[in-house]
Image (cartoon, grey):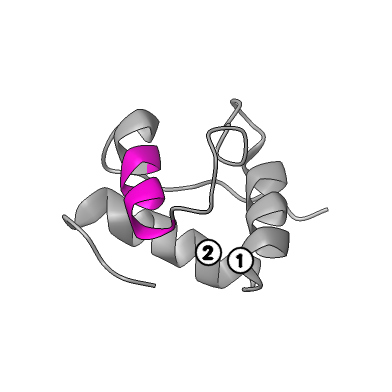
Amino acid sequence: MEITSLQLNKPWDEVRNRIKEQNIELTDEDLDLKPGKENELLENLQTKMHKSKEEIKKWIESLSVNEAQSG
């Protein structure tokens, strides 16, 4: 299994709130990130959002840099 790590410029709680603002269908449970479990998070979001893991990873990372970016 490929190991993916998110490169975040802001704390996960702040990024998670931005994600929820962009996609209100995602719950806190969907966005539960445990240390070293980035792949599990991305795989769960891939199923929910119908996007590739790479698209979701880039989107999350962009939200950690910018105020908001739709996706």
Residue under pointer 1: 49
In the rendering, at what x and y percent does residue 47 appear?
73, 62
- Compared to residue 36, the image places residue 67 above or below, namely below
Residue under pointer 2: 56
Dominant secondary structure, magenta = helix
Rounded to the nearest whole Å, what is the CA distance between mark 1 and mark 2? 8 Å
- Compared to residue 49, the image places residue 17 above or below, namely above
Locate residue 53: give its quadrant: bottom right
Judged from this view, the residue extending furthest toward the left is 67
Side of 25 where 63 appears, left or right: left
**Residue at (40% x, 47% y) in the render:** 20
Q: Secondary structure at mark 1?
A: helix
Q: Earlier in the sequence, mark 1 or mark 2?
A: 1
Q: Amino acid at mark 2?
A: Ile
In the rendering, at what x and y percent does residue 27 appear?
55, 40
Q: Amino acid at mark 1?
A: Met
Magenta span: 16-23
